[in-house]
Image: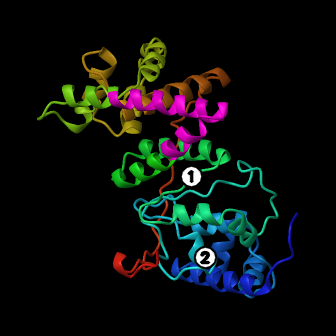
Amino acid sequence: MRHPPDFEIERRISARFRELRELTCQSQARFAKILAVTRDRIANIEAGRTPLRYREARRALNAQEDQERTWPFNPLWLAGEVEWPIQMDWPLLLPNAESLELPQALRFSEFVGMHHSLLVGLTSDPPEPELPATWLQPYLFHWLRLHHKETDLNKSVVFVENVFAWSAKRAARTSARAAHLLKEYNQAKSAMREVNWLEASEIKENDLLTETETCAKLSPVKSQLDKLLAGFDRLVKEPGKKTELARFLGAPLASVSRWLSGKREPGRNVTLKMLRWVEHQQRQQNKGPGNATTPPEPKTQSKVSSHAKEQPRSNRLK
């Protein structure tokens, strides 16, 4: 049963919400776009006329989540319960309302009340929560996405992995769903260990970067590439196609030629880009002649201000 809002709590949250927007150097219009709401709603939340919803809060806390080495803001800080840290030093995840089976209109204050002990565990240093069963799959996917980014996220990946693995092992004793997710996690770990072994054994010291990314492919990717390579000869024989592929991959034409001839194997990232290019070309050719175009590269977001820095760890509230 939902309770009416506590106006003092909502007032604290609205003040912190405005402070959060200002810390990220966002206008109300820009913040509204990030949160997928209107500018008027942002103004009403900041003025305390409208309670902040959970789905809006999680987007606001993760307004910089796609920026490299930029972590979410502390949900307990947004709730007005702590002064520090304002920003986390690991990529804490608040799952979307749908995956947690929460109503879309749930207030952020209600969410904090429902999950207070969990949020305390997540925002501890180091994090030590016990995730509920509904949080396990989002955290498993979060961990896999961090590995896929291949940036300097070692500490962060370990935090996310430990939070998931410890919680899943405990839940697996009584939950078939948790046991299944734990099995998927163990399979992923096994595949990653195999990749790391191949990379360590086959990388050569003086090769060009585009030629030394060897053997970072998982076997399912290699199998898929083998099937698609059958159509590569036909594709690259068309005038200009091999040059177009090299430009799309950002690799020298000579390296592309060696990959296609089988003299060398492309690395994992190159393999995935080759798969995308081939699939796109084949789809375009199925539509009709003359329609093939190079698939677009993902857009790079401009980085925002990071002046919301944490105080030294010794000054944080635990």
In the foreground, 206 or 61: 61
* Amino acid at dot 2: Leu
Viewed as shown, does residue 48 lie left or right of 76? right
Q: Is residue 73 visible?
A: yes
**CA–CA distance in space, label 2 to label 1:** 22 Å
Q: Residue at x 64, y 73 (%)?
A: 31
Residue ID for mark 2: 78
State which region is magenta. Answer: 164-193
Three-letter amino acid code at the position of disc 1: Glu
Q: Which mark is residue 28?
A: none
Q: Residue at x 53, y 38 (%)?
A: 169
Disc 2 + disc 1, Cβ < 8 Å: no
The image position of residue 100, as x and y in percent, is 72, 51
The residue sitting at the left extreme is: 206
Task: Residue 94: give x, y in percent of width and height.
Answer: 61, 58
The secondary structure that most of the magenta stretch takes on is helix
Q: Which residue is mark 1?
A: 130
Compared to residue 90, the image places residue 315 above or below, namely below
Q: Quadrant of residue 172?
A: top right
Identify the residue at image location x=27%, y=33%: 213
Q: Earlier in the sequence, mark 2 or mark 1?
A: 2
Q: Relative to the observer, which residue lies in front, 23 or 52?
A: 52
The secondary element bearing badge 2 is classed as helix
